[in-house]
Amino acid sequence: MTEHQAVSTSRRKLVVLVGSILVALGSGTNYVYSAYAPQLGAKLHLTHTQINIVGIAGNLGVYCSGPIWGKVVDARGPRIPLLVAFVLLAFGYGGIRAFYTGAISMSETSTSRFNGDVAALFFFSLCTGIAGNAGITSAMNAAAKSFPDRLRATITGMVVSGFGLSAAFFSTTAHVLFPGDTGALLLILALCSSFVMLLGFFIVQPVPHTSQQDLYQVLPATESQLSVVEQWDTFSPVEPTYEQEAIAHVQRTSRARDEARRSRSLVREDVPFLSDGVSSYRGRSRNAARLSLEMPAWSENGSQDRGRGRSVSMHRDFIDATSNLKQPDGDDLDIHGSALFKTLDFWVVFGVLSLLAGTGLMYINNVGLIVQALLAAGNPEWDRADGGERQAAQVSIISLANAAGRLLIGFGADHGKNKYDAPRSYFLVVTAIVAIASQVSLMYAEIPDHLWMTSGLLGLAYGATFGLCPVLTIEWFGIGHFSGNWGFVSLAPVLSGNIFNLIFGRNLDNRAAKSQPATPSPTHAFIRGLPSSNELLCYDGSACYTDSIRLSLFACFCALAISIFAAWRDKQRQEPEHSKAGVLWTVEEESTSSF
């Protein structure tokens, strides 16, 4: 690969990365639901359960369509899903806005939980969820396939951070441009989110990253540092073996580490590796922790320099180098289809995602109702305008923390793996602990001002979960069918999220029915278009939802237990790999009387 080609490829990757982040930003609009759900419910006289049913539709669209979009993206690329997302986002949010503004009138006759009007809202919300999954699947696939494994968690974290930032971006934009206008927020969602899908249609395409062969072609070599690959090509047209490629790779990086390791006493066992420079060692020496390998140096005319030799020792850090050479992107690992469901790893990541995402979705979809419950505690004349501002503030905090969690988990997981050889699954444990802390803080929040800690911690945990699980999906099952595999894994929140949301809504409705104030003040009958006389509110403060939080807290502890098991399992698998594949190579020149 020439320098010009390398620069061109780098630019294409940057364009794909930026485009993927923008597409992800437009894909996460379901997180904005809590910013307009209370106003939508009050305007259309919906119960809390009905509000949650409409919100559940968006979640169903996101997660249930995952396997379908995954297979489409793996087989045909991201363009078809992005085009469909463009249409569905405009249609879905346009329909919800039509109900809110009265362009589509609500029926006043049916009082059932799932009447025709609620079914229509359910369908429009479902469309937005399906579109969101089409967008984020396309964005993650293009970005993940454009960069090597050592950067994969970071790149994936950057893309999905846009997904998490969506709520803050759209709610803040609407609040600044059209304060207090929920109809304007829905219009912005319809136009802006669909536009970025159309933009992604043209620029979001996977860019193959540099192959090993390309890397070897551009590597310079002096006479004294002639690579094994070049030596082999001098004598044979056959491609170099795995071991020869490994030696060539580590020779380029070993000298800086050599001085630091000279003082260490390494037990060495001499094993013949190459004879006359061309013989092949195909048994991979995977049963020794450390090996001392002898190979000849070569003179200018290609003959052996018998006065000098090279002693190549291996240390356990070499696992990264050899794994990158043999499996640069997890390409050799390809678990998919029915085989996916037969692996324990699938059920581990599925279980953790189900429990943590279900907890997150319950809070994200209902934070507006939680704010209302705390403000209305013993105060039927609470300020609705103040409630709307506090509600928007919590949505923004969740969104920013969500984006930060996705970024931080990407950087942290890559850094821990590349520098300390720590399995990425270790960070699942940290994520579960943060989720537990968020639920504990919510149980003790008595006023809306206390919710910032819950929103921040919950956003971090939720974002970290969705930033890490796609990377673990690639690491455990391979990248060849990543989108399809991730589609199945992302079904996890469907059951838990919907159950948690329905339980939350039912608990709130039951409490509200028992705690209606005797006579609400007529002076507060209408504030910002919200008819308080028709509102179904709970006036018991945090007691309105404490039972629901106990359920989510238990779920987080279960997720912690599974995460600890996943981390232990990865560590157990890693130790045999160290002893088999072994190690970072250090090269030192030494004189020999004969070879």
Image: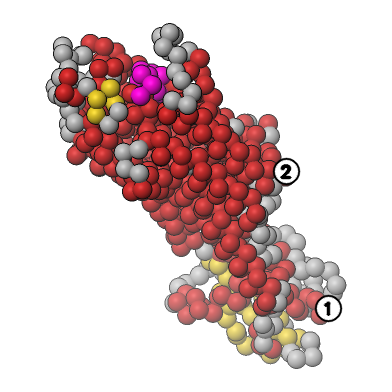
- Identify which residue, 430 or 115, lies in the foreground: 115
**Viewed as shown, does residue 513 lie left or right of 24?**
left
Disc 1 secondary structure class: helix
Asked if residue 70 is among those painted magenta in the image, a careful observer would answer: no
Q: Quadrant of residue 509?
A: top left
What residue did someone put label 1 on? 235
Where is residue 36? Give x, y as percent: 37, 33
| x 45%, y 14%: residue | 107
- Identify which residue, 145 or 33, lies in the foreground: 33
Say whether residue 155 is visible: yes
Q: Amino acid at mark 1?
A: Phe
Image height of 139 relative to 592, above or below:
above
Q: Amino acid at mark 2?
A: Ala
Q: CA distance from mark 2 to mark 1?
A: 42 Å
Say whether residue 556 is visible: no
Where is residue 128? Give x, y as percent: 53, 34
Disc 2 secondary structure class: helix
| x 55%, y 67%: residue | 584
- Identify which residue, 207 or 21, lies in the foreground: 21
Tell me which numbered mark, 2 or 1, is placed earlier along the sequence.
2
The image shows a total of numbered marks equal to 2
What residue did someone put label 2 on? 75
Image height of 562 relative to 211, above or below:
above
Question: Overall secondary structure of the magenta stretch?
Answer: helix
Asked if residue 46 is among those painted magenta in the image, a careful observer would answer: yes
| x 51%, y 37%: residue | 349
Q: Which residues are magenta?
A: 43-52
Which residue is at the far front?
Answer: 103
| x 69%, y 51%: residue | 332
Q: Residues within 10 Å of mark 2 (few under 14, many from 20)?
A: few
- Identify which residue, 351 or 465, lies in the foreground: 465
